[in-house]
Image: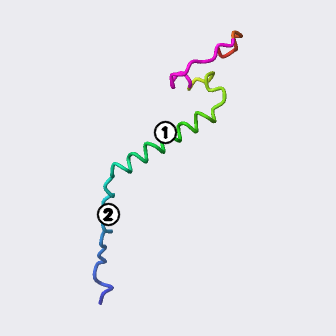
Amino acid sequence: MSFLAPKTYTPPPPPPPPPAETPEDSARAAALAEEAMAAERRRRRGAGSTIVAGALGEKPPTTGTPTLLG
């Protein structure tokens, strides 16, 4: 009479441990990150006049004509 017995649930097995990171992996990740940042800088147009440019340490271009934004 299994319908009278309480149901027992087994928990799922724990996830496997992550693989150990090797120096080659970290070097490759750093190279990919640097390449992505360089590609982002190449695509940027007029980044010196944005608010974000100050956070990145870039100087805004001096055009001589003041604008509404400064």
Magenta stretch: includes residue 60:
yes
What's the CA distance linking mark 1 and mark 2? 31 Å
Give the residue at x 37% y 50%.
24
Q: How is the image coloured?
A: rainbow
- State the predominant SS element of the stretch in magenta: loop
Q: Secondary structure at mark 2?
A: loop
The residue wearing badge 2 is 16
The residue wearing badge 1 is 34
Give the residue at x 69% y 9%.
64
Going by the image, does 18 lie left or right of 30? left
Give the residue at x 30% y 60%.
17
Label disc, if present, on residue 53 of the rendered structure = none
Image quadrant occupied by the C terminus: top right
Three-letter amino acid code of the residue under disc 1: Glu
Q: Position of residue 47 (x, y in %)?
A: 62, 26
**Which residue is nearer to you in this view: 67 or 28?**
28
